[in-house]
Image (spheres, rainbow, N blue to C red):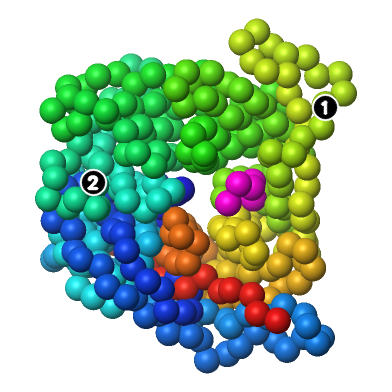
Amino acid sequence: MKSPDAGSERSPGRVLGTRAVTAVLATALTAGVLVPLIVLWLGHGAAGGRPGPSGAPQVTVPRPRPLPQSVGGARVTTIAAGNGVIAYGTEDGGLYASPVGADPRRIARLNERVVKLAFDSGGRWLAAVDLGSRLAVVDTARPNSPVAVRSIRAQSPLYRFPVPSALAIDSTGSRVAAQTDAIGIYDLRGGPSAPHDDPPRWLDEVGDNDLAFVDGDLVTASTDPGVCEGDYTCVHVYDVSTLRMERQIRFPVAVNALIDHGRLLSTTLSHAFVLDYRTTSPQPGATAAPGRPRPALGSTVAEKTISTRRSPSLRPVAYDGHLVAVMLDARLVFFEPASRRTLATVRLSFATCPSTAGPAPLAEFSTSFSPDHKTLAVAGFCPPANDVDDDTEEGRRLSTYRYWVLAYPSLSR
């Protein structure tokens, strides 16, 4: 699952919902001592879902709760939602975790600015990557245990310090998948004592939107025509033990794609889709390429018009099996796939960015959905008001970051 990271590096967090959530695990990044988790209370929004027809599903509208912009004296650069906790990465390489509302405690430290976080599907293992391409994995159930460290690689030698655009860790904490110029699989079974610079095993695939370990498989999603061999959005399923592609599923083309709850969420410039990559039908005329399975067509669970205007800001956020969340500009939109009804809309107070060099740009957002599907963290980013490059040290200092957490809404009838 993806975490909000400041800027693929600039993505802050995800939104958390509105209810009492039991905290059990930690969501952190590298090494250190993990805070004991306690029962986490997330207050309900004052406004409820709109009353609908008798028996129609409704939700309580979640209220975004601000998260700290600095931790341990350093600016927060990325966050991730865990089971009842929030993990923070900071400018100086610190990794912190805490229940919402509690003071974050450091659990590990990397060498440089933390740019990427990811939890496993059970919420126990936390993977973190810093700007120097150092990967660290923390066992949040044993916070005093040594931290496994590896070096993130690029397949091409032209990339010296690659930062992954997508990161996933399996439920055993022994494998990490990272997307740089190709997808590399890092084996951590040797533990902290294993060589740090062992090369990963490479998949013959690039350009993916998302990665996830699902039921023993590695699932990748892409909207890249080069990856999908045509005008499609595609899902590829790999056997984790052999890294052999077992299934190749195609869908109508989209702009963004996200794997969640055994489904593929995708968005165009105006529509959102819930797609099933497990229920397939043969693709007429499709043939199997050497070393690859024959492509199949996935099925559409739901389609909804989100915007009557074309907006490049529309992107998938989360799916808990009942409600879908998408982001449009600075609004979170929650809808039920079965009825296609919008049940809640949450506006974040960070819609436009200051600018002295032209029209004010919209803020950029990233999100992180907790493994237990109860917490959503959101990060917002504004570049400097002038023309300073936000990837430079001065640009990062002049950029603006905001973080929120929400309880993911649940359906009531």
User: 129 and 58: which one is in front?
Assistant: 58
Image check: 99 left or right of 369?
A: left
Expressed as whole percent of the image width and height from the top left, the position of residue 84 reads 36, 67
Expressed as whole percent of the image width and height from the top left, the position of residue 72 reads 14, 65
Q: Within 10 angstroms of label 2, few (less than 14), some, or many (20 or more) residues?
A: many
User: 3 and 291: which one is in front?
Assistant: 291
Q: Amino acid at mark 2?
A: Val
Residue 306's place in the image compared with 342, above or below, is above
- How many marks the image carries: the answer is 2
What secondary structure is found at the residue carrying circle 2? strand
Mark 1 vs mark 2, CA separation in Å: 42 Å
Q: Earlier in the sequence, mark 1 or mark 2?
A: 2
Does the segment drawn in magenta span residue 324? Answer: no
Residue occupying the point 47% across, 26% down: 240
Q: Quarter of the image for the C terminus: give it.
A: bottom right
Quadrant in the picture for residue 327: bottom right
Expressed as whole percent of the image width and height from the top left, the position of residue 379 reads 41, 63
Quadrant in the picture for residue 147: top left
Specify whether residue 332 is in view. yes
Q: Residue furthest bottom?
A: 46
Q: Which residue is mark 1?
A: 282
Q: Which residues are magenta?
A: 261-265
Q: Which residue is mark 2?
A: 138
Image check: 215 left or right of 116?
A: right
Q: Amino acid at mark 1?
A: Pro
